Amino acid sequence: MTNSTARIRPRRERRHRLPVRLWHWVNLWCLIVLLMSGLQIFNAHPALYWGSASNFDDPWLEMYAIRGAEGDIQGQTALGPWVFDTTGILGYSGSDDNASVRGFPGWITLPSYQFLTMGRLWHFFFAWLFAGAGALFALYALFSGHLKRDLWLPASQWRGLGRDILDHLRLRFHTGHGGYNGLQKLSYLGVLFVALPVMILTGLCMSPTFNAAAPWLLDLFGGRQSARSIHFIVAGSLVLFVIVHLLMVLLSGPLRQVRDMLTGGRRDVTPAESQGSTQHETP
């Protein structure tokens, strides 16, 4: 075997480094608890407003219950001028013997019964865990080269974004190179450096103590009610991201994807490829 052949021999490399795997699973459980406890908090006042001095007369989103013409109770969800009957799901839910007036049903809140104080305790504890893990991962991504190597888009991928979108819409996934395509990288960058920081900052806007220490943050988001609305919208976008992520995992080899995210996985790479991405294929 010649020296030139030896230099290009593929070598085994981890698909997912340990910090990436740890952050993935910590995020999973944090987001589950934060979503369920956040909906418990939302149920204490199931309406959202815009403005710094809202008088609570003009919500852009509201969930409530009304009594129908025949005396039955109906759940209603109002989105601006549009009102939808959401009985059994939003506004009024539960079994016939144990139904209750509440924004979101008990099966998706933490705790399942109406207990605002406990919901806040769960939410605040996991919010700090979530923020701390996110800050550590951002530092790791910057200083380890993970950001530049695996997430940053070169010019060729910016030019290929249209093709990536069409391929995903056609359920065509490229699994040969083992790296993220441009659309996947853009999605992860948006979550890591836009959605997560906005979630944390708007959450801080709802703390009276932090408002006193940094009143400029309230002004940045247009007041507490606007910050609460933005917090809710971004949380919904993260839920949508997770749903799409899970669908892509199911469509592109779920057993391998989960196994690799648990163990790190292995793949053959040449020295040239090792300078690029080492991550998996699902968005």
Image (cartoon, rainbow, N blue to C red):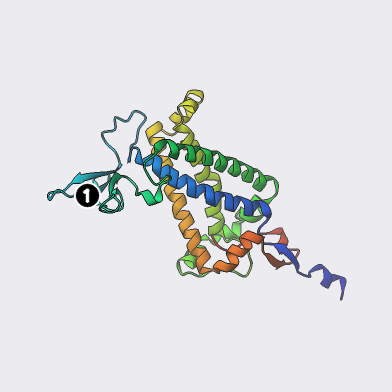
* Left or right, residue 12 beside residue 72: right
Give percent across and percent down for residue 215: 47, 25
Give the vertical position of 238 relative to 267 (above or below).
Answer: above
Q: Position of residue 9 (x, y in %)?
A: 78, 70
Q: Residue at x 55, y 38 (%)?
A: 128
- Which image quarter is the N terminus in? bottom right
Toward which corner of the image does residue 116 lie, by quadrant? top left
Instruction: Please say if 271 is above or below 208.
Output: below
Q: What's under tag 1, amino acid-wise? A: Gln
Query: Dot 1 lies on which element?
Result: strand
| Residue at the image point whose x is 48% and y is 37% from the top | 121
How many residues crowd mark 1 within 10 Å: few (<14), some (14–19), many (20+)?
A: some
Which residue has dot 1 on it? 74
Residue drawn at point x = 79 percent, y = 69 percent: 8
Q: Position of residue 140 (x, y in %)?
A: 67, 46
Q: Is residue 142 above or below residue 265?
A: above
Q: Nearer the viewer, residue 70 or 209?
A: 70
Q: Is residue 279 visible?
A: no
